[in-house]
Image (cartoon, grey):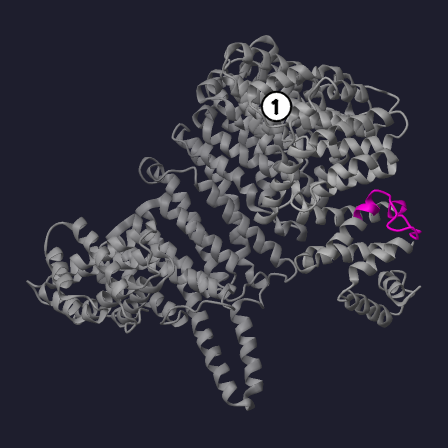
Amino acid sequence: MDDLEKAILFSFDESGAVDSVLKSQAVNYCQQFKENPSICTVCIEKLCYCKLVQVQFWCLQTLHEVIRVKYGVMSSEEKGFVRQSVFSMACYDSIDEKSAVRVLDSPAFIKNKLAQVLVTLIYFEYPMIWSSVFVDFMPHLSKGSVVIDMFSRVLNALDDELISLDYPRTAEETAVAARVKDAIRQQCVEQIVRAWYDIVSMYRNSDFEVCTSVLESMRRYISWIDINLIANDAFLPLFFELILSDGLSEQFRGAAVGCVLAVVSKRMDPQSKLSLLKRLQISRVFGLVKEDGESELVSKIAELLTGYAVEALECVKRLNSENANVVSMELLNEVLPSVFYVMQNCEVDSTFSMVQFLSGYVATMKSLSPLREEQLLHMSQILEVIRTQIRYDPMYRHNLDVLDKIGIEEEDRMVEFRKDLLVLLRSVGRVAPEVAQVFINNSLASAVVSSPDRNVEEVEAALSLLYALGESLSDEAMRTGAGLLSELVPMLLQTRLPCHSNRLVALVYLETVTRYMKFIQENTQYIPMVLTAFLDERGIHHQNFHVSRRASYLFMRVVRLLKANLVPFIEKILQSLQDTVARFTSMNYTSKELSVSEDGSHIFEAIGLLIGMEDVPVEKQSDYLSSLLTPLCQQVQALLLNAKTLDPEESPAKITNVQLIIVAINSLSKGFSERLVTASRPAIGLMFKQTLDVLLQILVVFPKIEPLRSKVTSFIHRMVDTLGASVFPYLPKALEQLLAESEEKTSIREAFAGEVLLHRQNPLLMEKNSLLEEASIASSGKAFPGGHQDHLPKELAGFLVLLNQLICKFNTSVHDIVDEVFPAIAGRIFNIIPRDTLPSGPGTNTEEMRELLELQRTLCTFLHVIATHDLSSVFLAPKSRGYLEQIMQLLVNTSCHHKDYVMRKACVQIFIRLIKDWCSRPFGEEKVPGFQNFMIEVFAKNCCLYSVLDKSFEFGDANTLILFGEIVSAQKVMYEKFGNDFLVGFVYNNFPSAHCPQDLAEQYCQKLQGNDFKGLKSFYQSLIEKLRLQQNGSLVFR
């Protein structure tokens, strides 16, 4: 053993016996040895004499690398030597008389590497230099299975390395592949095919392995050689003989199936394909698919049948002649039952899209109305496939019921998996509605009586089918109960499912009942059954919390749809919901229940919708509402009275309980219209006012508990919509309390910020800093159970949203309120948002920064609402005027630089409105001194010129064009109000700095003075585009 062989062994060592340093040195030695000029000779010599597989592999790998990388610089003699040597090894010949080793006696991975080396030579030399490589191989096949096996490996490697389209190829590789295939077709493909046939015929009973390898190679080549070489009276009978022979190995028979599938899948014109499919007599293998479902042969047969069906369907689609269409349909009908069996019982190849094929079949059937009996049967079989596929595996039943991690993952997987299948179901429902309804009816009936071990999954699948079918039905069909619907829906309502306690079954049952509610609207005799389903243990009183909560939401939807039809049942409904209502607002929440979702509030919304109708007698309506509001308000009042004596351990539960009570009252009020509570039945309105008065006390007693403040604010929003103008007396108190907390926070923020700055300057203030931290904690509510951290920007944004609602609903009627609160709100906002643009980039995507951005957005919306509702005088009030400069600066910056073009547009619209409100010149005095100059020198220059000159202002974007239209409108309005002052200040002072030619500036002035706004907009856009081209870099656009 020489040094190279030792180094190769060391470098391949995985046992750990070789020291890592020594192994590294061995790897380097081998790598350096590859630079030896005679490396090819060395490698071939080693392959002739060395039996160590590591050495053989390294030598073949090195030969492969050298040929691939250095072929162009190799001498003719060296190429010839390598060619002859490698070919001799592949043919089981000795390179010389002294050669003691045959590479073909080595393991499979060595033979595969030898095949790869030979294919690399073919890549460079066939057919220009080495035209006889395949022809030369043929005589050696007589040496037996060793050479035949090697020949198959070479063909497989040629396919893998060069021909197959399953791998990405470069343009050069594609060209070489075309060259090689053309040469094989012209020169030797018939000889190769004859060799394949002879080998399989000769060895079929003696060497299954070599026959299998030959058939596997053949399968790869069928797609691009002349199909008549394979689809003939020699090969086709042989293939089917092998497939149907019980005495052969499954791999051998499966390889024959693969060749038939390759023939079936061969691309050709549809008429030729139809003739080929008919000739195959595929029915011969139908029986095989029903053998052992997990065997390799059955999987192969399944692939063949599905592939055959796909091709037959393509013939149906593409052939227009009546006779050909009939034949192709017969072939498709013949294979479909076996395909349906495969889909339900076998592992289908991943490359076959079951849903795509079935969808294509259903789409084809649309044009064949009315469907024949056989096609209707196929539709039913498709539905059976869908039902089988969407059924959950019973092994996950417990996980799905308790909804643990495994259950959540399985449910998510199945939801995604079902999507396309349920789309297919709806397609079947449209093409064959009666078949779909009969199938689902029978499925549901059989599922109910199925064995307990399958009952849950069978029922859930049947109900899911019925639910999905609803999407394929028109509103008319739903209302009238077309087809079997008039039987299906009542059966659904009457059936008591033995597995109703299961979460999945209960949920899909309720969803399905809700889906068919339009039928109930037209058939009101079923309303009692619907109510029973929702109100008993199948719905709201279900043992599973998730089902109960979902039932509450769905019941609310049902009430919304049925409404007036439910008046006779209100007493029964309320009585049934008493325990649910009490449980939702229980004062005895455990720690586990504190995180409960508020979905249960939907039950209060449903009750509100029921008792809030004018069809309900006024006395009963008052009684119903009072019976709900009174105990809820009493609970809140009791907590408020005992706030100071609250036990720290129980206070979180109490606070959470109050939150839920506010949510419940809020939801309850949604059923009452403004007209009812203010005009027709003011006594109802009085109850809500009294409730509002109680809930506003929460802001006084618990000013620092953010969740409570948020819920109360939400209720104020609701009362603005419900009580209308009668809410006015309550607004001062509400707004005062909401502002009071933000004022306290602002002052603490300022104090804390100032002390931190002082501390940085004076390190002696360490102790004081810690005291400030304690003060900050106390002010933020951390010291109080249920308190909150400082979310001032978020709270201020919420306050602005409330003001926006008031302004939009009451317009100038709220002038005095807005005038009063504006200075306070503006002062607090401008204390916490930067005067310039908010920072962006890395490190700025924090929760605090997101809240500031949202506050800025909400502030701009607020200013827009004020300006567009005739309230711009608020900006000029004595207490507010001090903020005018900051407001103007914010609006200009936003209109020029904000990344959201909708925000920029809103700011431009504000300026347009302010110009109209504040500027009566040239015929009157200036209402706001300096405003005109600001608009011309700051807004017009920066927004109307520089911002649109920036190349980031893309005219191809729809939102940009809308903003541009507003900017042009602003220029028009400024000219109308400012006259020649605008032309002088904007055009003659700014256009030259943008390198605008004099003639274009004059044209702009003419367009501006005219009445053609579209013409002005079009001209200004072309002007901006020209100026962008003309700018020479001296003007910096910001």
Q: Residue at x 67, y 53 (%)?
A: 591
Is 860 displayed left or right of 412 in the figure?
Answer: left
Q: Quadrant of residue 724?
A: top left
Query: Would you say the magenta stretch is mainly helix, strand or loop?
Result: loop
Where residue 775 sits in the image (x, y, percent)? 53, 75
Question: From where the camera sits, is residue 98 visible?
Answer: yes
Q: Quadrant of residue 3?
A: bottom right
Quick one: 358 or 844, which is closer to the camera? 358
Is 532 displayed left or right of 304 in the figure?
Answer: left
Quick one: 154 or 693, which is closer to the camera? 154
Quick one: 161 or 646, which is closer to the camera? 161
Q: Residue at x 51, y 26 (%)?
A: 471
Task: State which quarter of the image contains the N terminus.
Answer: bottom right
Question: From where the camera sits, is residue 528 visible?
Answer: no
Where residue 311 sits in the image (x, y, percent)? 61, 23
Quick one: 279 or 14, which is closer to the camera? 279
Task: State which quarter of the image contains the C terminus.
Answer: bottom left
Q: In the displayed orientation, state which residue is furthest to the left.
A: 923
Give the residue number, with chain letter if any, for mark 1: 311
Where residue 297 sits in the image (x, y, percent)? 79, 27
The kind of residue on which mark 1 rests is Glu
Query: Does the magenta portion include 363?
Result: no
Residue numbers of the magenta segment: 86-106
